[in-house]
Image (tube, rainbow, N blue to C red):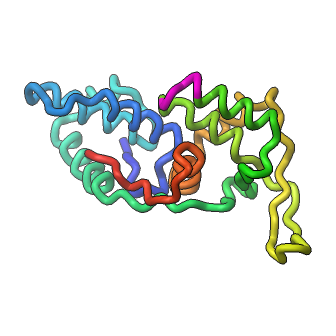
Amino acid sequence: MEIVKDWSEIKLKQMVKFLKFESDKPKSFNDDLEELEYNLNLLSIFSKENVGLDYVLKLKSSVIKSKLDELKDMLLNVPDFTLHNYFIWEGVKYSFVDFDDIGMGEYISYRKIVERHQGNVEMLPTVLAIICRPVKETKLNPITRKMEHILEDFDIKSLDFMASKLENVPVLLVMGSLNFFLTGKIEPTNNLSV
């Protein structure tokens, strides 16, 4: 079993599982067994092969200890999740909507998702599918003299498809932007605890 060795290997869906798992984590463990169960789940979440807990339970204790040491070293070195204007993933350039110029369909979908899930991290891929889309064209704005991205039109019918596709985007590319859209703040989002 291989685990991710660097933050660039972590997909959004793994981060969602991790953040949800962390939110349910007790402030302190009652005993060694509870801590061991927590650690085994971490290995399952951050396995490259997306193995389940059943697979992890079959590993030898020496392998588990070695993998946990690698994983904890990586998790303790959380990078700053930078706010990106765009990113290229799987050969496609994606960019984020300008909230000052957002369409009503996007706005209503965004508000409904955020209100329905009230901070539940499982909404992150859907929020990303609303605020981030492939770039159709990049052109110079004659007034601002800055390059602007023209995005594909928002389509509510393809929202679930886009959300499932974007679950696999590397978290380093999108976490800073997701944080900005959800909080309205531009700040490093490296406050994870292990």
- Count the marks: 0
Where in the figure is residue 119, as x and y percent of width and height?
48, 31
Q: Is residue 120 visible?
A: yes
Q: Residue furthest bottom?
A: 145
**Is residue 45 left or right of 81 when viewed as pictured?**
left
Residue 27, placed above or below residue 67: above
Residue placed most toward the observer, 138 or 46: 138
Q: Quadrant of the C terminus?
A: top left
Point out the stretch of residues depicted in magenta. Answer: 115-119
Q: Which residue appears at 86% of the width and 55% of the height?
A: 136
Residue placed most toward the observer, 59 or 23: 23
**Is residue 165 left or right of 19 when viewed as pictured?**
right
Q: Quadrant of residue 55?
A: top left
Q: Residue furthest left?
A: 31
Q: Residue furthest right?
A: 142
Where in the figure is residue 26, as x and y percent of width and height?
22, 29
Where in the figure is residue 20, as x and y percent of width and height?
40, 31
Residue placed most toward the observer, 133 or 41: 133
Q: Which residue appears at 72% of the width and 55% of the height?
A: 95
Q: Quadrant of the N terminus?
A: top left
Residue placed most toward the observer, 66 or 79: 79
Q: Which residue appears at 45% of the width and 41% of the height?
A: 15
Where in the figure is residue 41, as x and y percent of width and height?
31, 31
Residue 144, placed above or below residue 18: below
**Is residue 66 left or right of 104 when viewed as pictured?**
left
**Is residue 188 left or right of 126 when viewed as pictured?**
left
